[in-house]
Amino acid sequence: MSMSTYNLLKKHFIPELLMSSIFILQARILKLSHVTEVSYDCCLNTCCCFTRTYTGLDSCPFCKHAWYNSEGHLYKKYKYLPIEPRIKSLYLTDCYAEVLRYHSLPRDSEIEDIFNGIHYQMLHMSDTSHN
Ligand SMILES: [Zn+2]
């Protein structure tokens, strides 16, 4: 959760609620969800993340805005929650785990949904392991 999101929630949605600091909230969210936020330096105009081939640059290759200001501080960070730990976290909850296993339940021969379709059945029988 970014500071601006925290301030927005605090100001507009739950002003009467005594919210913990953003750092305490983030620690609680991490503990409950098992999901860690990932952040990357990015262009102020959100043109690109300074990763991989853009790591060694001083400015954005698209809009030419500098990566850092004159004091050496970056202008912006891009933050997101990776999908893999989010899905793993869903499997930790019994009710969601049951829902997520829905496609593997035994079925009769009638077509009820996409999991009865020929294409899905062919994919299911083929090697779908990811390397
Ligand atoms: Zn840019």
Image: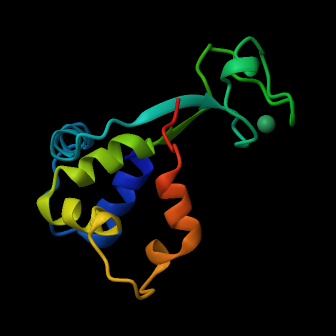
The quadrant holding residue 72 is top right
In the rendering, at what x and y percent does residue 48 appear?
73, 35
Please tell me whether residue 116 is drawn above or below residue 39 in the rendered image: below
The answer to whether residue 84 is left or right of residue 89 is right
- Whether residue 118 sits left or right of residue 43 in the image: it is left
User: What is the x, y in percent for residue 126?
Assistant: 53, 49
Above or below, 120 relative to 126: below
Question: Is residue 54 in view from this perspective?
Answer: yes
- Residue at the image point whose x is 44% and y is 33% from the top: 38
In the image shown, does 49 or 119 lie closer to the viewer?
119
Quadrant housing residue 5 = bottom left
How many labels, in total?
0
Name the side, left or right, on which 95 lies relative to 26: left
Residue 56 in which image quadrant:
top right
Q: Position of residue 20 (x, y in %)?
A: 16, 48
- Residue appearing at x 67%, y 31% in the figure: 49
**Residue lying furthest front in this view?**
109
Between 98 and 13, the one lying in front of the other is 98
Residue 2 position within the rendered picture, expressed as x and y whole percent measured from the top left: 41, 45
Q: Is residue 81 visible?
A: no
Q: Residue at x 51, y 43 (%)?
A: 127
> Which residue is painted at 21% across and 45% down in the image?
25
Q: Point out the quarter of the image occupied by ligand 1.
A: top right
The answer to whether 112 is drawn above or below residue 65 in the figure is: below
Colour pattern of the rendering: rainbow
